[in-house]
Image (tube, rainbow, N blue to C red):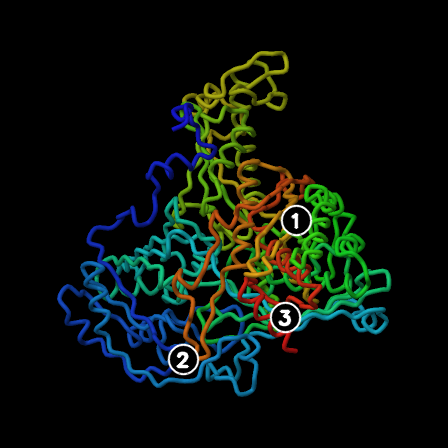
Amino acid sequence: MPDDAQNWVPSRDEDAALVTGRGAFLDDLDPLPGTLVAAVVRSTRPHARLRSVDLSRARAHPGVAAVIGPEEVRAALRPFPLSTGAVMPYLPTGVDKVRFVGEPIAVVVASDRYIAEDAAELVAVEYDELGAVTAARAALEPDAPLLHDDAGSNVATDRTFSFGPVEERFRDAAHVVTGRYDFPRYSSVPMECYSVIAQWNEGDDGPSVEAWANFHGPFSMVPVMAGALGIPTSRVRLHVPADIGGSFGIKAGIYPYVVLMALASKHAGTPVRWAEDRVEHLMASSTGADRAMTFSAAVDADGTVTALRTDLIDNVGAYLRPPEPSTLYRCYGNITGPYRIDAVEIRARAVVTNTMPTGLNRGFGGQQLYFGLERLMDAVASATGLDVVEVRRRNLVSAFPHETATGGVYDSGDYPAALDLAVKNADLAELERRREAARAEGAFYGIGTALVVDPSGTNIGYVGLATPAEDRKPGRDKSGSTEHVRMSVDLQGKVTVLLGSVPQGQGHATVARKVAAQRLGLPLEQVRAVVDMDTATTPWTVTSGSYSSRFAPLVTSAVVAAADTIAATVKAAGATLLEGADPGELTLLDGKVVHPDGRSVAFRHAAGVVHWDPASLPDGVPARLYAEAEFSPRETRAATADDRINSSLCYGFVAEIVAVRIDPDTLEIAVDRVSSVHDAGTVLDQTLLDGQVHGALVHGLGGAAYEEFTHADSGQPTAATFLDYLCPTSAEAGFDLRTDHVVTPSPLTPLGAKGCGEGSSMSFPVAYANAVADALAPRGIDITRLPLHGEVLHQLLTEKENS
């Protein structure tokens, strides 16, 4: 143990409890007496009609309280409301068919997990097997198996958008550069899998559901749950524990299980607890969407990209599960990345396949977009004979605010400065010498670059783009990025900040406490932050939740608003103690209310006036040290009639350079150096920001080199355990990492902060691919898909030799 261990002070408020085993995870909680345990019976077939589901033997097993199956689900639940008009009803179990391996068929509720699992094995399912399809392009084929009979095709949504003189630009281009790319399906593999406790209550005023779940939002899923249960939203009460064991988007997909366990509770007559095991999670929880895409650029002779065409096909799995097709549209406003391209054409399709449904996954929509766009920029460099860095530099946005062709408004930035810093920190000249030396020896060494715009503060209105403007109901638009915070001051001047942002480990309490303390002029020990999401008592809207890097731009802005309200009351109260003082000339500093002439009173004494002597307050000053504040930026409006939308409030920037070395004998790819520069606006906490950068980069490494959900031709998953689904560890992340920051404060948030929770998860996969492509360029091999590892390189080299 280090000599100073006893004096160690955690860098985050959350750390002490976590490292001493005092975390409040759902498995640590037992909120309801008499809770029984559930096990889920899952499909073993990728696509089949359910001929029969016999629950009788399971129901007769000792210790079993209830068993529900397709008939109970069909009778009690409505299909989840979808964001498009696709005739692809989605329920939490298969009822007529099963459409992916792992799809729930039945739930067994028993006195303990062992009995529930034993009884689950007694459920007898007879299938009429059907053909399966697992890949996006294959699902479009005329002879592809049809997942949803009434839909008529496997296309869940298909929209085309055009802005500017696209045809003219392509006709007049000196070069037309086209690439066809595939981005893999991968996940987040959180430490804790899905966990739910649910209770169905029958009251005099109708049924209600109370549930606990390790769910991080978005809370737009609460009305989706209520709709499926057929009860008002106000009758669904959802609790989220302070610690949820990680998510990075994946746990937004837990809501079907909340509904399913609520129904199981109704039949059992008791609360029901269900905890997912790792195999269930890898087989049937949620993943990011895999995307098949084509990108084309119209390019002038000097390397300027004048127009962009994209054809995006997202594989959303067996159902268009809300919030999909969000992955298609989340980066709609920044579809052109950091480049000045004012003519854009987009075709956006989502198709269903016999795979687990998709949803949010760190950087969702961004890693798919930038894989295509930044591979295309390398192809533009090749077509024009320009260096890959130079061709990007020539096309960068350089003046802000910048409005994109699709309606995004980039609030601030200095993209050339960030690129220059990334090049400098990478010591690009040295890397180029390493590349030349390796090639001279017949070895492989490559350098890849990626530049991405990092959106934060999602505007939920982008989901409306899946519906043509003429079909959107007047007065039913959706928009916004609202967040709420509640703040109070007690009798002793202690400040409490209540957050409903449901962190997944990012340190929200740490930053909220710091922001509140700074705004109120208080020492940190006089402020505490509480994370406690209870939809019956915590302020929230449908946009609330921890997703799309919302905390820094949105939640902290609400903290500022609440603190300013409290400050105004404290100053007014302080003025009564500083006789003759004008509240407008007082400041809060070092735990005091300070007059310009040097007189002061303690913050706690001023707060005490409100509690103990409210009659002394000036007229019009409320006797209330309690503020519920919201931040609801007006820049995030609904989609326009011509399908333009500012799909996020703020837009950061990442410039990343990756160098890789490939062993010529084993073809093992080793990352040699990474230079990563981020602009997240004002830095609220350097340690937490660095942690986000490092974590996102390793997450991106997973998708770039290791993680992929694969399937056999039959449709059976072939990566349902950690023996086949590989994740990077600290050993794989031991490369030379050089991170840095450029700061251009956002003019749209009170603190100038933007989000930075996703950056490198979007930039690293394609920077890595560009580096591998550069390494293999002497062999004439193009890189069009991920992940990339030795086996893939062996296949590519063999195919090249045999061609």
Q: Residues within 10 Å of mark 3 (few under 14, many from 20)?
A: many
Residue 20 visible, this angle: yes
- Residue 101 at what x, y percent from top left? 38, 73
Relative to 322, residue 391 above or below: above
Q: Earlier in the sequence, mark 3 or mark 1?
A: 3
Q: Amino acid at mark 1?
A: Val
Q: Earlier in the sequence, mark 2 or mark 1?
A: 2
Relative to 777, residue 56 above or below: below
Viewed as shown, does residue 528 lie left or right of 296?
Answer: left
Helix, strand or loop status at disc 2: loop
Q: Residues within 10 Å of mark 2 (few under 14, many from 20)?
A: many
**Numbered mark located on residue 644 in the image:** none
Task: Please tell me in which quadrant of the rendered image residue 180 appears.
Answer: bottom right
Q: CA distance from mark 2 to mark 3?
A: 26 Å
Residue 630 visible, this angle: no
Helix, strand or loop status at disc 3: strand
Helix, strand or loop status at disc 1: strand
**Numbered mark located on residue 47 in the image:** 2
**Residue at the front extreme of this rendering:** 441
Q: Name the one closer to the observer, 607 or 75.
A: 75
Query: Dividing the image into 4 quarters, which one contains the C terminus?
Result: bottom right
Q: Residue at x 46, y 18 (%)?
A: 605
Q: Residue at x 48, y 48 (%)?
A: 731
**Numbered mark located on residue 654 in the image:** 1
Viewed as shown, does residue 120 lie left or right of 468?
Answer: left
Q: Earlier in the sequence, mark 2 or mark 3?
A: 2
Q: CA distance from mark 3 to mark 1?
A: 23 Å
Q: Which residue is mark 3?
A: 293
Q: Amino acid at mark 3?
A: Met
